[in-house]
Image (tube, grey):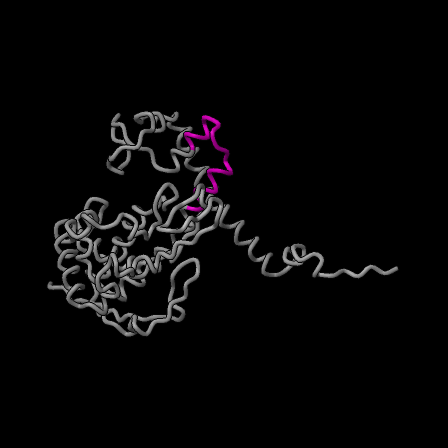
Amino acid sequence: MRRIFSPWLFPDLMFALSPTNRKQTKLLKILHGFTEKIIKERKLYHERTEDRYLKNTESNTLTETDDAEVIGIRKKRLAMLDLLIAASRENDITDLDIREEVDTFMFEGHDTTAMGVCFALLLLAEHKDIQDRVRTEVNDVMEETKGNLTMASLQKLPYLERCLKEALRLYPSVPNVSRTLAEDIKCQSYIVPANVYVNIDIYAVHRDPNFWPNPDVFDPDRFLPDQMQNRHPYCYIPFSAGPRNCIGQRFAMYELKAMIAPLVHHFYLEPVDYLRNVQLKMDMVTRPAHPVRVKFVPIKKKQ
């Protein structure tokens, strides 16, 4: 009797044999290879330095310190990868655990940051007065550092940082996050039971008029210290919140500043596509549903 193979009976097998799966497998191999290379090189570095940088910490206690490399015998906070390697030396985690954490840090951050840059540039292009104020701040820092942006100089851009925070309020890179409740939660007169899967709509939270007057208006001064003082701590959550918040949020802000500051320094931004006409696609990342354009006009520097 002839056997007939039915793809409906073996959908996983059919996907495994499909061109899409083969392409995905190839790409994942490249990504994992890159991550494993980073881990291997860092482990080799610690082996060659006899782990002195892993040991040169205050019992791995997180403290507010500079992110610079160890100088002399000064004690410092370990970088994330070093913390993971230190934990693996104690057999607390495996190499696979390290790779998964590094994968998250390396690859979850690139698309979200790119969209943050995209929407920030669109907003600055549409708001010339705000753009000019950012440029003045950036130019002052550039003059002070002779055109070299460092970690320290990026911290001297508070107005640009407020603009980026406001851009992330209006267009959060991740539009929603999900959680499974560990216990019953009372919401006004309702009880949401434990083990229920809930979705937090970050985009809607950021435009709630109960917390944000004129929520659709781009106003960086919302993030002045006096404006933030009495604000609900969870009405602004572009990087999520709580123990499962984004591990790369500080790095992301440095990335955004490092990319946008030189652009504003060297170019005037002029709108081509206006945000009011941009259709958003709410996927894992907030993105325009179609290409958007900004005009870059070179700034002629005085000789």
Image coords of residue 59 (percent x, y): 33, 25
Measured along the vertical axis of the image, is residue 290 above or below residue 31? Answer: below
- Quadrant housing the C terminus: bottom left
Taking the spot 11% from the left edge, 64% from the top edge, the residue there is 302
Image coords of residue 241 (percent x, y): 34, 46
- Residue 90 colored magenta? yes
Measured along the vertical axis of the image, is residue 60 above or below residue 155? Answer: above
Q: What residue range appears in magenta?
A: 85-104
Quadrant of the rendered image containing residue 245: top left
Q: Name the residue nearer the viewer: 123 or 209.
A: 209
**Res. 298 visible in picture:** no
Q: Name the residue nearer the viewer: 257 or 196.
A: 196
| Predominant secondary structure, magenta span | helix
Q: Name the residue nearer the viewer: 213 or 3.
A: 213
Taking the spot 37% from the left edge, 38% from the top edge, the residue there is 80
Image coords of residue 255 (percent x, y): 30, 51
- Residue 208 colored magenta? no
Taking the spot 40% from the left edge, 30% from the top edge, the residue there is 46
Measured along the vertical axis of the image, is residue 64 above or below residue 199? Answer: above
- Quadrant housing the N terminus: bottom right
**Res. 49 visible in picture:** yes
Image coords of residue 128 (percent x, y): 17, 68
Taking the spot 40% from the left edge, 45% from the top edge, the residue there is 185
Quadrant of the rendered image containing residue 242: top left
> Extreme front residue here?
189
